[in-house]
Image (tube, helix red, strand yellow):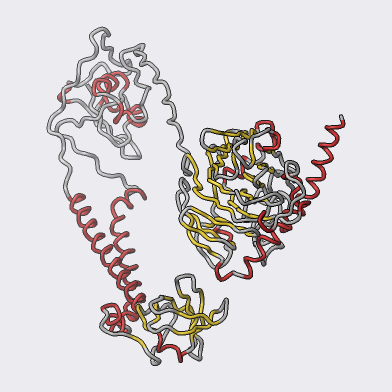
Amino acid sequence: GLCVGRGLKQRQAMVQVKPAMKLWRLALGLVMQHAGSEKLCLGQLTMQGTGAPGYVLGGPGTVAGDTLNLPHSSGFNIMSRCAPTWVPQDFFQFKVLEKTLSFTVDLSKVGCGCNLAVYMIKEPAKDPAGQPSMGTCQDSSPYYCDANKVCGQWCPEMDIMEANIKAFQSTPHACDAPTGIGHYNNCDRSGCGKTTKDIPNSYGPGVSFQIDTTRPFDVQTVWQGNNMLTKLVQGAHTVVLDHSSCGAALAGMHAAMSSGMSLRITYWGDSPETMAWLDQPPCKAEACSGANAGPARISNIRVTPPMGPPSLPPLPLPPVPPIQPPAEPYDCEVGRINWEAEWPAAKKVWCCGHSGVGCISTPVGTQAPAPGPSGPSGIAFLHKYGFLIFLIVLLCLASVAVAILWPRIWKNRGAAFELMQGRRTSRGRSLHLQRGDRVAVRNSFNGAGLWWGQERLPRGVAGVVEDVDGNGTAVITFSDRLGKFSVPQTDYEHLEVQQAATAVKTQTGIAVVALAVACTLLALILSWQHSASQSQPMAAPTAVPAPLPAPASVPVAMPAAMPAAMPAASAAGCCSWDGVHCGDTTPWCKASQANCEENCKGRWKLIQ
């Protein structure tokens, strides 16, 4: 009972101290980023299985290939692009549910009292309206959030590694379900931590430990179902931290990990008290300073299997029911709605003679009835005149495009074609810049940056003119992460125009006009082909096809409604439906008027 009570008190103390320590971590590990914001992006970090490289924002530190070198008091985020400032849409989202996130770490010089942390958070944070929120750390780490409400914002946190040379801990922190637009209101501050301190001789400096922290080792974190396994691998030795007992702490992370979480890497620590929850014991009261706070290295970040949309298993095919033989030779009610396409010829003859359905042949010497007085329907009108309407609409659109764009093309034709063909070079103080022009530095000069002071603009760097005021001062955004500069007209002599906005607009106008003309020609061709096909007359049948014999096992019975005096097949009567009434010309059609009106629907029916 004494041991349990002591452990509970230590846990409660850790819960109270850890939020303050994380705030201290941000204050020390992130504030320096604002001071060196002109080098906020350290460069591209090669990663495997992520679908794209990442870019490291933060500092201080260096990036080389797949390796991140970290000094003490540093903090970094993995982003999707290299930008001079924090952009909420740029946080690289790691979707590692049902996957393994691995990396190699060298913390041989990260002593007691220090903490080298690799963790994921649901960043950028969202405010109650569901919009990205900068929080209270706008000058150091905007959009930051975690499970201890650092920077005033809650979000799920997955501590993959919090470690130094003598202790290693991993802790998932779930949150209450977010609102429908992604805002979190409360999280589990303490989390469900697992530590190497509970596994004797598993982790520490020297060959007597399974993981010798004086040498690099791999950290492999596997998320499967509602379980999390943290594996420390070094050669033939493996130490496993099993989170299967965490239950709800892991289940609550499922939604956040499915949609993606941002990766955060920090190296922090100060007095012995700030890190006692992590490393005492086995550490004594040691401060994170001097030789204890040497450099660290994270490398070879990889996700297996690679991130991407999950492959769905093929859907099982429904069982095919066996074909049941009909109780009678043919059931003329089955498939009656679409009998022309679905019935075989034998069934059409059978049902034509027994039920008056399925009779599609035209007798010799007969002609199709003229259309009724009601005129063509709306569908027939569209079928007949649709291409004409389409042609008229295209011609109107082409006329509008030409009327709007051609005057502009004609007005700027000379300058535009000269610039496009490279026959004229625009440079010097007489240069006239306008918004959208693409320029390049021909002679290096000192420019006035809008985000920071004077900076040398090297020769050859390209830029785009964003605005020009009435005094001729241009705001130009230069590439190579130089940012925006205010360039007065006196410095135009150092610039040359590579492509004028007039040339771009002229090219666009020509493309639109050409597209309109091409669409018009295509419409004319299709309309001509449609008219030619409509003008060809339909040939009437010249002979009556002989009916197929009925099945031998069943005698053919004539319908009861058929009159006794039925004409021969060669002079068989017929009836037609024109939408109003039947065209009855023979005794058979008169006797079958009801059947004709119900089933004929404008088609000729041969009576056998």
Residue 151: x and y in percent read: 71, 58
The answer to whether one can see residue 1 in this image is yes
Residue 479: x and y in percent read: 45, 72
Residue 330: x and y in percent read: 32, 17
Q: Quadrant of residue 443?
A: bottom left
Give the answer, above or below, for where 490 lies relative to 303.
below
Give the answer, above or below, for where 514 lies relative to 276.
below
- Residue sitting at the far left: 542
Indicate left or right for 253 with 401 as reference.
right
Residue shown at 48% from the left, 40% from the top: 304
- Residue sitting at the far top: 553
The residue nearer to you, when weighing 414 against 327, is 414
The answer to whether one can see residue 125 in this image is no
Indicate left or right for 288 with 215 as reference.
right
Q: Quadrant of residue 98?
A: top right
The residue nearer to you, when weighing 489 against 362, is 489
Q: How many marks?
A: 0
Residue shown at 59% from the left, 62% from the top: 59
* Rendered-image quadrant of the C terminus: top left
Residue shown at 41% from the left, 26% from the top: 317
Indicate left or right for 491 with 366 as reference.
right
Give the answer, above or below, for where 448 lies relative to 575.
below
Indicate left or right for 271 with 78 as reference.
right
Residue shown at 65% from the left, 46% from the top: 163
Residue 290: x and y in percent read: 68, 58
- Residue sitting at the far front: 207
* Rendered-image quadrant of the N terminus: top right
The residue nearer to you, when weighing 389 against 462, is 462
